[in-house]
Structures are given as C-alpha cells and as structure tokens.
Amino acid sequence: MRGTFVRERNFLILLSGVFINGIGGGVYAVSGMLLVLQMSGSVLYSGITFFFLTLASAMAFLIAPFANYVTYKGGLIGSELLKSLLLVTIPLFYFTIGLNVFYVMMLLLIVALISQFSYPIESTIMPIIVGKENIVKANSYMQTIREGMSIVFVAGAGILVVVIGPVQAILITAICHLLSSLTYVFFTFQQESAPTEKQSINLLVQTYKIDLRAGIDYMKESLIPKMIVSIVFINFAMGVMIPNMPAFALIKGNGNEALYGFYLASLSLGIMIGALLAPRIKQYGFGMLTIVSFSFTGFLWMGAAVLPAIPSILFFCIGAISIGIINILMFSSIQQQVESAFIGRVLTVLTSAASIGMPFGSLVGGFIGESFTAIVPVFLCGIAMIIFSVSWLSNTLLRKLPKIDEVKLFPARDVDESIQYEKSV
C-alpha cells in the first residue's frame, strides 16, 4: 500500500463517494443560495442563510464527538442517507403544499449540521486507509479530484439551474447523496477502536464531555491556538464576501444566473491548482509561503471586484490558489502528527474555533451588500487578505515557521508522552 494507495480498495471507494458528491455538491452549491435569493429577493437573506451554514461549522465541536459512538462506516452511510431524505423534501413540498424560504434556510442548516458529524469520520479514516506516510499525497490527490469535479459540475450547474430551476436541481443533489451512501456500504477497512456500547443518557453526556475536553487539552500546548486568531479574522472576511457572490455574479453578468456557477467553478479551479502544487512546494518555509501567497490573493481579489466579468473570474481563480496550498499543508500536518484517536476531535475543535468568524461575517456582509452593492464586500475581502499577511509577517513565530514537514505542532510533547496521554484518556 505504500506508494500504491491509489489502487487500495477502500481508497477507491472513498474516491467514488467524493466523485458522486462532487456532482451533487456542485449543483447544490449553486442552487441552494440562488433559491434563497430568488425566493426572498434580498442579499440580506443570503447573508442570514450563510450565517446558518457557517454556524453549523462553528457548532461542530458539539456534534462531531458523537461520531465516536458509531462505526465509521455506519456513520458515513447514515449521514449521507439522511441528507438525501431531507433534501428531497424541497422539490416535494414545492410541487405539493408550497415552499417557504424560511423552511429552505432551516433545512440547509440541518444538512450542514449533519455534514459536521461525517467530516471528522472522513478525516479519521484517511490515515487508516492510506497510512500516515502517504497522507500529504493522498490528501492532495483527493482534493484534486474533489475540486476537479467541482469545476466541471459547478460550472455546469450554473447552466443547469437556468434551464431546469434551482428546486429541480436540488433533487439531483438528493439522489447523489443516496448513491454515495450505497457506495460506502462496500467499505472493508478495520476500525482501530470499537464504538462505545449503549449507555445511559447521563453516562453518554459525561463521556462526551470527557472526549471534548480531551481534544481541547490535547492541542492546548500546540502551535494551533496561536494560528486561530488570524484564521478567525480571515474567515470573517470570507463570510463577508461569500453570501454576496450570487448577487455579485448577477452584477458582473448583467443578470445572467449561470455566471454564479462560473465564479464558484473558478474558486474550485484555484483550490485544485493549489492542491496540486502543495506537494511540490512544501519544501518552502510555511510562514513565508503563507505570507506571500495570501498577499497575492488580496491584490487579485481586489482586482476581481472592480474588473469586468472575464478578467474578474480569472483573478478570482488565481487568488484561490493560496487557499488550496495552505489547506492541504495544514490539514496534512495535523493528520501526520496527531494520533488517530484524536484526529477527529482536534480537527473538530480547530475548525469550530476557526469558523466562529464566518457566521458573523456573513451577517455583516449581508447588511453591506444590501446597503451598498455586492462589489464592496468582495473588495473588502481582498483587503482583509493583505491584512492577514501583514499580521503573520509581524509575528516572529509565524513568520519563521519552517517547511511543513519540519513544523512541530506539539513542540512540548514527544512521541512517548503522546502515547501515554492517549492511554490515560
């Protein structure tokens, strides 16, 4: 399996699930936000919807630990099936009793919450499937496939939504979640630890609290908390921009809804290019790599805000490359250095803390887009990227971070100490 993980049965199954969800996710990314915008006619409602979606990420630390009480295989199958059943109610209600915008907004939140349950499972099984020595390559490969599918299907979804409508398009997403749940039935990997046996509610809550606390304690003395403040800031800025993208695309395309799909596709293309580049440039100092790449992103996205549609999409795409690079490197570093029993909990605490800024950014972005124009939030996000780079440049510790393979996330803990810690918990 070392070096041949791409032919490993379970990796191919996971890859198949990613491919199927790439189809559904592309359609969903375009149709969900456009449906809210169409039904409400307000950028503010788009901002509130995105607030709900990102609030789910911030609440991940409350949800994800319950993944420890199911088998990884069962958790993935069940979550995909439940998302399919929920999403199919949108076209069902639309063609029968009628559809309410608030129902759509709440349903999108519930689906996002379910994703927070399955996300740490996917992260945890990757080292089990491919081995920790293949994590960077496997994540890069998977991200490339995921973003590649997103480019094709998000761009196509923009046209599809115009032809058949966002409600009908969401039915395609529901079918894809059903198919991915059937795909995960064929997993055969061995789970390292069995799920917790049935317990009383009180005991379950106590165990949950212990697991959550263990994840927080595990990363307390690491470098991760030192990075979280700046990540919260950048997520706040992204939250300001993203809910305005449907209206921003309509402005750039003179009312052409399909252009929103092309903007999302350009974002995916940039992230995919970054994922492809990550293994090739990981030998550069992580601190300066982050500073330089996000500086370029800031200037490019400021240009994307004011330029016509075609150069705007091009600049938006190139600016997203840094996101793909940094995401792969940071994610892989955590998977390499954290014991399997803690990967889900550490990633959950990290993503929850980092996501705090995005829900509030989306509310601010909704008000800004409603009060001025959707161009302003995109321009402000570009400025925030530059501020982010300057903050890392001014921090000696972050600026001097070595190449990612040499970054010690847990400098105060050696391997033996980690093993003892895991056993004690």
Image (cartoon, rainbow, N blue to C red):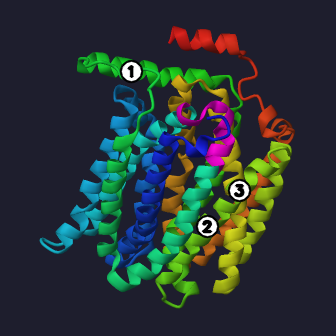
Task: Please name the residue shown 39% across and 51% down the image.
Answer: 112
Would you say residue 229 is visible in this rendering? no
Q: Give the mark, 2 or 3, whose residue is nearer the N terminus.
A: 2
Q: Is mark 3 on a helix, strand or loop?
A: helix
Q: Where is mark 3, residue-wise?
A: 276
Out of 186 and 303, give the one closest to the viewer.
186
Q: Which of 49 and 263 is in front in this view?
A: 263
Residue 341 x %, y %? 52, 23
Judging by the rendered image, the residue that carries numbered circle 2 is: 267
Q: Image quarter for residue 127? A: top right
Q: Which mark is residue 194?
A: 1
How crowded pointer 2 is (Cα within 10 Å; few <14, some 14-19, many 20+) is rated as many
As helix, strand or loop, the secondary structure at mark 1 comes to loop
Along the polypeptide, which appears first: circle 2 or circle 1?
Answer: 1
Q: Position of residue 280 (x, y in %)?
A: 79, 51
**Cα distance between the residues tagged 3 and 1:** 35 Å
Residue depicted at 18% across the width and 68% down the height:
93
Q: Is residue 167 left or right of residue 251?
A: left
Q: Which of the 4 quarters of the picture holds residue 21? A: bottom left
Q: What residue type is labelled 3?
A: Leu
Q: Residue at x 55, y 26 (%)?
A: 340
Left or right of residue 193: residue 244: right
Q: Magenta residues?
A: 128-140
Q: Is mark 2 on a helix, strand or loop?
A: helix
Are there few (<14), some (14-19), or many (20+) residues within 10 Å of tag 3? many
